[in-house]
Amino acid sequence: MGNKHDVAPVVAELVRRRRGDRPFLDVFCGLCSVGGAVARTGHRVVGNDVQSFAALVARCLVATVEMPPSREKLKDSLWRSHLYNQRRLLERFGDDVAREARILANADAHAYRRAYPHWRHGANSRTVAAELAAIARTGDRRPYRLATLSFAWGYFGLRQAIAIDSIRFAIDRARESGRLTPAGADWALVARGRGCGACCRAAQSRGDAL
């Protein structure tokens, strides 16, 4: 994702020069670098991609007239719910978070390598795999923990995964409560994914679980 960013202005200029009102089809649109640039020329854009995050980006850049929420708006809307989910996860994984913090503070790669196999996640624990399956089956995800149980100590650090889950929880709660409009919540999800580049890489490798 993102490897079409440099060519997007060139394509947009070529499309701008063409007459007519035929739509522009952005095949495998990804993060919509090309489609977004073409849309700013006034052409109608249709994009497709297999990943739901790519569709979300396209919806915000091409089909949404509402501007992204301000930093202050996001902070007011998300902070309390973020802290709630984070607190719940720290209650469960606090010892692991403390061990990770000690290892990182000492920059001890050998200690990290020794600790890694002891972390139970969806790929090495039947219990955790069953928990993830139950989340998918029942939809009862509180506290949000998909990134924590799927990607911690791998794609992300444990504390990072807890933050990713807690931000997603806060965005969903803000959408449900009306603290963010549907478009505002979509913009927040895009910012979450784009703000953490590894989220995009994980989505490419492991689907749209986040």
Image (cartoon, rainbow, N blue to C red):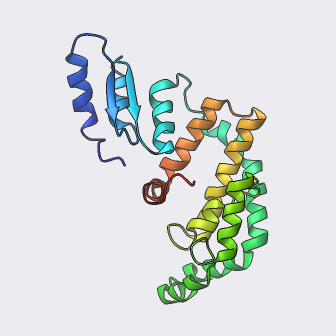
Asked whether the viewer can see residue 32, the reply is yes
> Residue 118, located in which quarter of the rendered image?
bottom right
* Residue 22 vs residue 91, the one in the foreground: 22
* Residue at screen point 27% across, 26% down: 12
Locate residue 24, reporting x and y percent: 31, 23
Left or right position of 169 against 54: right
Furthest residue in direction top, as rendered: 20
At 59% from the left and 66% from the top, the residue drawn is 150
Identify which residue is drawn at 57% across, 55% down.
209
Location of residue 161 (image quadrant): bottom right
Q: Eyeballing the image, is 126 above or below 183?
A: below
Query: What x and y, as percent, mark residue 60?
Result: 50, 31
Which residue is depicted at the point 46% across and 31% down? 61
- Residue 31 lies in quadrant: top left
Q: Quadrant of the C terminus?
A: bottom right
Residue 46 image offset from top left, x and y in percent = 39, 26
Q: Left or right of 190: which side holds 3?
A: left
Observer able to see residue 76: no
